[in-house]
Image (cartoon, helix red, strand yellow):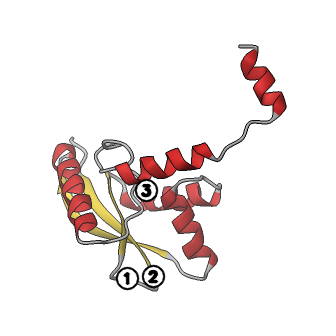
Amino acid sequence: MKKLWSVYSLVDSREPTAIRYIGISCGPRARLSGHINEARKGRNYHRARWIRKVLGSGGSVEMTILHAGLEKPDAIALEISLIASHRAAGDRLVNGTAGGDGGAGPTEAAREKMRLAAMDRRHSEETKRKLGDM
């Protein structure tokens, strides 16, 4: 029996019309729990930080199934399309990629932000010594 996939969105319960994340899953309820658990463990990526902020300020993260009963390739294609259209419309998505099993990686804006952040890092003298010993 084939797994059927769903495309879903996540929102802050206090702003239910503002979609902040779009994803796919063959077990959406378990996936929502996974997102929340990852955030509570202190993961340091945009979605996890957003979830911690929502929960810490008294809100809850709610999932809406946008499309269900899809085969995986169709779910992936729809996820990519929805992420692109929501970003084009100016929605502030916390997706780290363009979608589809890891997608195409970070956006150009995200890459530039990471590059600038890396420029500000300074290695300790001990780390410099260790790197020099390699």
Whether residue 3 is situated above or below residue 60 in the rendered picture: above
Taking the image as shown, residue 109 lies to the left or right of residue 128, namely left
Secondary structure under tag 3 reads helix
| Residue drawn at x 36%, y 49% as measured from the top left | 108
Q: Quadrant of residue 13?
A: bottom left
Amino acid marked by disc 1: Pro
Secondary structure under tag 1 reads loop
Q: Determine which residue is flagged by label 2.
A: 13
Pointer 3 local density, CA inside 10 Å: few below 14, some 14–19, many at least 20:
some
x, y percentage for residue 55? 59, 74
Q: CA distance from mark 1 to mark 3?
A: 19 Å
Which of 48 and 65 lies nearest the eye of the viewer? 48
Q: Quadrant of residue 127?
A: top right
**Marks 3 and 2, the one that precedes in the sequence:** 2
Q: Quadrant of residue 10?
A: bottom left
Circle 1/circle 2 CB separation < 8 Å: yes
